[in-house]
Image (cartoon, rainbow, N blue to C red):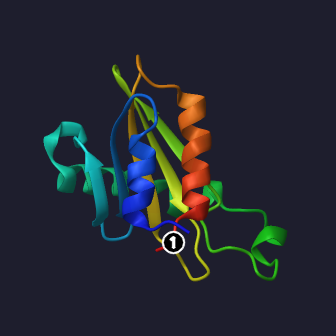
Amino acid sequence: MPGIDECLGEAMRLPGARSAAVIDWISGLALGVAGDAPGGDHEASACEAAEVARMVAEHGTFAPPEDERARPGARALPAVEDVIVTSADSYHLLRFVGAVYDSSVFLHLCVGREEGNLAMARLRLEDIATRMVL
């Protein structure tokens, strides 16, 4: 099972990938980064992406149904799997990473609109997040 650096390298091999990061959405701390940060600053980008992830993860509207929360062995994940934010020239994908314990980590991938494929990037990021070992 790949670690953070291997997963970031795999994400950066996606067509159109500009940057990738593993971020703790509670603290805003980047646990690993690759590529050119959106806005030019990895730390600022991590904090800003963490704000979006935190808003989604903690919002009651996105909570899983009551029967899913009570299921034994349920993974500690926000009910939302991923968040997609589009801008004029790029897609930003935030994919929550599950863990046996309460995980507060997500992958942030920035993909150029003209070079990338949003659907493929989303599916590959899901696979990477599933296999990543923290």
> Residue 20: x and y, percent?
35, 48
Q: Is residue 3 above or below residue 129?
A: below
Q: Looking at the image, which residue is at 61% across and 68% down?
A: 77
Is residue 18 shown left or right of residue 71? Answer: left
> Residue 76: x and y, percent?
62, 74
SS class, disc 1: loop
* Residue 18 vs residue 84, the one in the foreground: 18
Rate crowding at label 1 as few (under 14), some (14 to 19) or many (20 or more) other CA atoms within 10 Å. some
**Amino acid type assigned to the residue bearing label 1 in the image:** Val
Q: Which residue is the site of mark 1?
A: 133
Q: Residue furthest top?
A: 114
Q: Looking at the image, which residue is at 52% across and 45% down?
A: 83
- Is residue 87 at all visible to an observer of this figure? no
* Residue 49 vs residue 15, the one in the foreground: 15
Quadrant the N terminus occupies: bottom right
Total numbered badges shown on the rendered structure: 1
Q: Looking at the image, which residue is at 78% across and 63% down?
A: 65
Is residue 27 shown left or right of residue 39? Answer: right
Asked where in the image residue 64 lies, by quadrant, the reply is bottom right
> Residue 111: x and y, percent?
40, 32
> Residue 67: x and y, percent?
84, 70
- Is residue 4 at all visible to an observer of this figure? yes
Q: Looking at the image, which residue is at 59% across and 63% down?
A: 131
Q: Is residue 12 above or below residue 77?
A: above
Is residue 51 shown left or right of residue 59? Answer: left
Is residue 118 shown left or right of residue 17? Answer: right
